[in-house]
Each structure stands twice: as C-alpha cells, then as structure tokens.
Amino acid sequence: MNLLRLSGGLCALLLITALVQAAQEVPPNMRSIIEKSQSFGIGKYPISFWSYTSLNAHGKYMDEAEVAEWAECGFTVPQSPNFDPEKPEQVAQMRQLLDWADQYGMKLILSDPRAYARPEVEAYKADLPSVVSLFKGHPALFGYHVGDEPGADMKEAFFSCQSALKEAAPEQFPYANLLPFFPGIEARAGTDTWPNYLDEYCQKAKPDLISYDCYTQMNPGTGGWQNYYENLRLYREAALRNGVPFWNTFLSVGHFNYRCPTLDDIRWQFNTTVASGAHGVLWFFYYMRSPHSNYRQSPIDEHWYRTPTWDALRLVHSNHHKFYGDLFTRLVCTKVMFSPEPFGGGQAFEPDGLIAEIGPSGSPDSPALLVSEFVDLEGRRYVMLVNNSQTANARASIKFRGADVRVFSYNWAGKEYEGGAYSADDQRREADGLTLYHWLAPGQEAFYRVESASADTELLPL
C-alpha cells in the first residue's frame, strides 16, 4: 500500500495504531521525528527569527553584545545576517559571530547567498564545496538558509538544490521555508493538493524539517484562526507521514492588516503552536532596519532599540526554557482537540481513554480550550491544556481517568515532580479519576505527564 496516497488523518492514524497507553515500541515515523529533533543538538526548544540584515548594511551592530542579546531573548537557533563570502573581513566577522553564538549556547542558520536555491542547479552544485568548507565543523553552525516560499516555476530546482546541499554537508541541517496553505494556493505552488505538495517536498528535497509561515491569526477577529489551525494541522500530518519535524513561523510585527501582537498574543501563538505538535518556531521578524510600508513595533525597532515586543518574547521564551528545556523535542503530538468549537478542520474534544472531560462546558461562557496529547520514545503519555483565547482569562479544568491516576508536572527548575502544574490551584480526586483546576491567562498552558494503569488503554487517534 502506498501510504502517501492515503489522506493525512488516515495515514497518521495507521502510523500510531500500534501505540497504546502501556509503554510499547513507538512507530518508526514518530521515532524518526524525535530522533531528527534531537540530532539538531540545540539542547533547548528551537526558537529562531527572520533577520533580513546584512553585514554590508548592519555589520557595525553585529558584535558580541548583540549576540548576547539574542540569547537573553531566549533564541536558540537565530538566522545570521547575510554576508559576502568574497570579502575576507565579512567572513572573519561571520566566524566571530559563530564563535559568540557557541559561547552563548546557540547555533546559527547561516545566510550565504551562494547557498540560496536558484534555477541553475548544476552551477549551484558546483559552488557547494566552497560553501560548505567555509565554516565546516564549527559547533555553532546549524546549517545554511536555502530560501523562502518557492513558486511553481522554482519548485523542482528548489527541491534539488536543498537535496544537493544536504548531500554535500550531511552533518548540517539546511533550512528552507515553504508557503502557507490557503484556498487557491495550489497553482502558485505547483501542486494539486497541499498534502501531495508536502509529501513531494519530503521525497525530493529530503529535508531535516518542514517549515512554513502563517500570520492570519493576527487578523482582526477569529476568522484567520481557521487558516492558522488548518496550516498547523496540515503540516503536523505531513510531519507524521514523512517522519520529519515541522517548524512554524508566526508574527511579531504589525503590518498590512495584521495587528501588532501583545504579550497575550505572543504567548498564545507560541503555546498553541507547541500544543499543535511543532518542534520549533520562528518569529517574523526581529530587526526593523529602516521604516517601510506600515511595518511597526518589531522586537528591535528602526533606531536599534528594544521595544515592548522584545520584552514579551523574552518572557515567553524564558518561561518555556525554565519549565521544559528540550522536553518538547523529545515528544510527538498524537492528538489535538478543541473546545467548544474546532478550527481548521480539527477535532472537537471527545473523552478518550486518558481524558474524561475538560471544562467547564455546556454554558455560553465556557472557556475556549485546546487540549493535546503527546507520547515519548518510551510510550509515556503527556497532555497539554491551553487557554485558546487571545484576550480572556479562563477558569479551566481537566479530569484524567483512573482510580490510580498520577500526574507529573515541571517546576521552575525544570524538574519533574508529582502534582499539579504551576498554573493549577485546586484538585479533586474521585473513585474514577483526578480533576485539576487552573486559572489560565490568554494562551497560557498547563502540562502533565500522566500515569494510570487502570485507565482504558485505547489506541492513540490523531
């Protein structure tokens, strides 16, 4: 049977039907996602940004203090400035940036224009030895930036260039970004359906990760949420089918009809993306450079000062690192559910063998919640509950099945302990399970590892 011809949901379901609540062997494609994420060697959750700077125009800013500021903001794998490999002074400065990145515990996605995919594939391949030898073996080199959002006319060359770059430097991880899905985008990308496009990309480009960008969640109202969550679902299903992790780029800069994200918006984007199974994230973008269009309030403004957006990013990133470290690179998301209404073709919450109920529900003022399930390589089960509102606080509860159920959370030192999450403020144990109660700010999460020998051992659905 050709799994790539199956629908995304059915294929993912087949991949995980062997996994039950009791620890068992994790299916190969899920194991591959975790192993690839771990092979990146970042040591924390991958967090990057789009830079759009160059050493020609902005080299005077790119010193050790600037690199230290990336680390202070919680970035773990930033994009470097663009540099000219024909200028020895810029090569030396880029090497220094790599050295500083290593010193501050980061890796860089390098922007060498010779590594950008181009139509002349054979000429591109001829340049690769000089590209990959320049900083070969540097511990802070994640990989080279291949390009962004290829169209139909560039698709085949783009895929070939990325594959060739990986073959030339198998120890590195080329970074490329794809278009987001929206109705009618298929012709622009050169495909018939988006699952087929993503599968073709994985087959031909042989990526270590699948990355894309989506900003509709910052449109007025919740209309853009459908597209936001549909992309998260489509890319997550493609990741499961092909055994590679996916990364999502979301918004840190107001522009066009997208509003400037607040602290609550930033927390919401980050946690809903993690809860949807992403193994890394990027922010669009970090540096304003010079004013243009109606772009505004980027983390670093046009005068090279920090804005409130920078502080919000630092807080959200730092909290995640403190509580979870690289935990989410060691997990695979097996189910995503919404309450009260699903978005993007997703699944409404239904009780299963692990979760009996979330709530409160059944009233007009019920909180909007996102609940996801995860598994690690040992088959242990995890659950993430997120307040799926960008503006309203939520009093949320979750009930885990089993008279003997035990829950484990993570403290401020990043250590697992038995008990409620940091956001939990009450609990009630009954004969058939344990209910925990939380106050959750917009986009705030509660996260648990769950053990219950007496709970139903049903298979893990998508």
Image (spheres, helix red, strand yellow):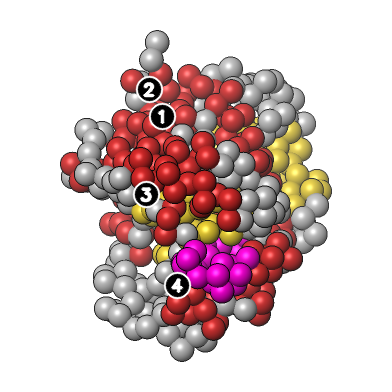
SS at circle 4: loop
Kindly identify which residue carries mark 1.
203
Most foreground residue, 237 or 263: 237
Name which residue type carries label 4: Thr
Question: Looking at the image, is mark 3 or mark 2 nearer the viewer?
Answer: 3
The residue at the point 65 percent across, 80 percent down is 65
Q: Disc 1 or 2, which lies upstream in sequence?
A: 2
SS at circle 3: loop
Q: Distance between the Cα atoms at labels 3 and 4?
A: 19 Å
Q: Quadrant of residue 205?
A: top left
Name which residue type carries label 2: Leu
Q: Disc 1 or 3, which lies upstream in sequence?
A: 3
How many other residues sit within 10 Å of disc 2, few (<14), some (14-19) or many (≥20)?
some
40 sits to left or right of 48? right
Question: Looking at the image, is mark 1 or mark 3 nearer the viewer?
Answer: 3
How many other residues sit within 10 Å of disc 4, few (<14), some (14-19) or many (≥20)?
many
Is there any visible trace of residue 436 in the rendered image? no
415 sits to left or right of 110? right
Q: Distance between the Cα atoms at labels 3 and 2?
A: 26 Å
Q: Distance between the Cα atoms at labels 4 and 2?
A: 39 Å
The residue at the point 47 percent across, 23 percent down is 13
Kindly identify which residue carries mark 2.
4
Name which residue type carries label 3: Ala
Q: Distance between the Cα atoms at labels 1 and 2?
A: 10 Å
Screen quadrant of the N terminus: top left
